[in-house]
Amino acid sequence: MDWRWLAICCSLPPSLMMVAMCFMPETPRFLLSKGKRREAEEALRFLRGPDAPIEWECARIEDACNEQGSTFHLSDLKDPGIFKPLLISILLMVFQQMTGINAIMFYAENIFEQAHFKDSDLASVIVALIQVIFTGIAALIMDRAGRKALLIISGILIFQIPHQEKERLNRRRKRFTFHIMWRQDIF
């Protein structure tokens, strides 16, 4: 299959979702925060069905909106309950980018072609399938082992493995340089 057809096929679900979202009502919480109770009840009726206890749920949402407040200010970022999770999320994204896995996944087919694989397309699909499988396994392990412990271990490995690889390459380069110098002395 040509990449253009693959791109068209992959663009169909998001396009259909975008068209379908035009028919979705605003959320009841948003409507209540704007003081539109009747429209919020209609949205709840659309989402829950005609037999659902809409008035009770609408009152609960309204109480939660009043209790929590609906506006956000930059000064809210000073709150450790918001600042720490935001900082951790940003750092995790930075660490993921630093590992280079996105570049490897994007250029996997080219990498396999340059490594002289017979079927680089299939190899790329296998790599992506393995990534999906281990993401599922990781999701199961996270709940049992604890997110904090796994985060610390992966953070250490992110910085330790490249350092070890650099040392290994330096040792290999020194051996190769010595081998070339030794050959030149023979001749």
Image: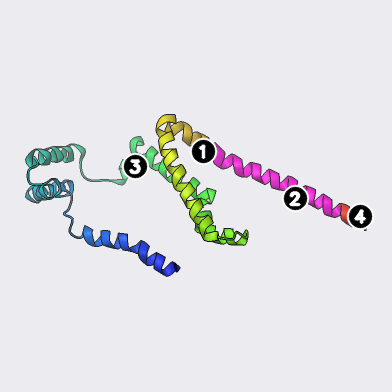
Q: Is residue 128 left or right of residue 83?
A: right
Query: CB under 8 Å between callouts 2 and 4?
Result: no
Q: Secondary structure at mark 4?
A: helix
The image quadrant of residue 24 is bottom left
In contact (CB < 8 Å): disc 3 and disc 2: no
Residue 185 disc label: 4
Q: Is residue 172 magenta?
A: yes
In the rendered image, residue 32, in percent from the top left (x then y), is placed at 13, 46
Residue at point 45%, 44% (across, down): 133
Residue shown at the point (58%, 58%) measured from the top left: 112
Disc 3 residue crowd, few under 14, some 14–19, many 20+, Cα 10 Å: few
Segment colored magenta? 154-181
Name the N-terminal-most of marks 3 and 4: 3
Q: Is residue 185 magenta?
A: no
Identify the residue under disc 3. Answer: 77
N-term-proximal mark, 3 vs 1:
3
Residue 48's x, y, as percent?
13, 45
- Is residue 10 found left or right of 41 in the rendered image? right
Gap in Å between the C-alphas at discs 3 and 1? 27 Å
Labels 3, 2: front one: 2
Residue 48 visible (yes or no): yes
**Mark 2 = which residue?**
173
The C terminus lies in quadrant: bottom right
Q: Earlier in the sequence, mark 1 or mark 4?
A: 1
Residue type pointed to by label 1: Ser
Q: CA distance from mark 1 to mark 2?
A: 28 Å
For residue 164, the mark is: none
| Amino acid at circle 2 | Arg
Q: Which mark is residue 154?
A: 1
User: First in sequence: mark 3 or mark 2?
Assistant: 3
Q: Is residue 140 depicted above or below 15 in this figure?
A: above
Mark 3 or 1, which is nearer the eye?
A: 1
